[in-house]
Amino acid sequence: GQNIDQPTEMTATEGAIVQINCTYQTSGFNGLFWYQQHAGEAPTFLSYNVLDGLEEKGRFSSFLSRSKGYSYLLLKELQMKDSASYLCAVATAGNKLTFGGGTRVLVKP
Amino acid sequence: GAVVSQHPSRVICKSGTSVKIECRSLDFQATTMFWYRQFPKQSLMLMATSNEGSKATYEQGVEKDKFLINHASLTLSTLTVTSAHPEDSSFYICSARIRDRGFNEQFFGPGTRLTVL
């Protein structure tokens, strides 16, 4: 079966850094995605990792270690608008995405 | 580019009726479309994978006779919730994968909130 774990909630202060961890055990691996989702809206793409290492994109970075089944999303210089749910998803056979439970991040002033 | 639309965005219906949700890729051809449902404060659960011109593949536990999926063209897939009941109330989201692109990225529609009374 597929198992993707991430913390349920995190709270951070505006301007700070937050790291959201994701561990996975899946049958097959074709890459790992991070999505941002505001309440009542569709997920929007943040990052994609298929090889080990760090991918940086502005304030957001994502890291992958395939041998450890581990990824993290790093959000720097937090802004109030970053308050949202962050979804870790693993692409498996058949181009399917299996999502973790999502991490709700609350940014406080 | 890569815009996916869904219609309607919200629907309220009586128990026992059927509801059709449309998912369209507006500026690209989608080989494959996916249908998800999301309950409040939970993550997305894949319901089925829809390939143009063939039958949908349903995930374990999803009733194919209750959730009818039709993928008649490379830009349109529909999900029909038949004989809807209050427990079917949920946020339904579709996504599409660009034809001939090896990258696995899926583009998500804005979602449809279904409320069954």
Image (spheres, coloured by chain):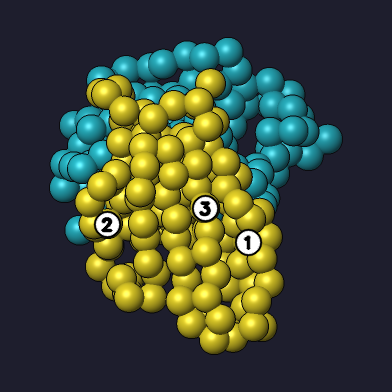
* Total residue callouts: 3
The front one of B64 and A77 is: B64
Residue extending furthest toward the right: A109
Above or below: residue A15 compared with residue A68: above
**Shown colour of chain B:** yellow
Q: Nearer the viewer, residue B74 or B86?
A: B74
Work out whether mark 2 precedes mark 1 in sequence or the reverse, and give the earlier one. Answer: 2
Q: Which chain is cyan?
A: A
Which quadrant is the C terminus of chain B positioned in? bottom right
**Subunit bearing disc 3:** B
Secondary structure at numbered mark 1: strand
Tell me the residue at 26%/39% (across/down): A95
Q: Which residue is mark 1?
A: B113
Give me the disc on residue A53: none
Is residue B89 toward the left or the right of residue A62 in the image? right
**Marking on residue B22:** 3
x, y percent for residue A90: 32, 40
- Residue depth check, mark 1 versus mark 3: number of the one nearer the observer: 3
As measured in the structure, the alpha-carbon distance from the residue carrying label 3 to the one carrying label 2 is 15 Å
Q: Is residue B2 visible?
A: yes
Res. A106 image quadrant: top right
Q: Chain of mark 1?
A: B
Q: Earlier in the sequence, mark 1 or mark 3?
A: 3
Q: Residue, x 53% and y 58% (percent of image)? A: B21
Q: Amino acid at mark 2?
A: Ala
Q: Which residue is mark 2?
A: B56
Question: Secondary structure under badge 3?
Answer: strand
Which chain is indicated by disc 2? Answer: B
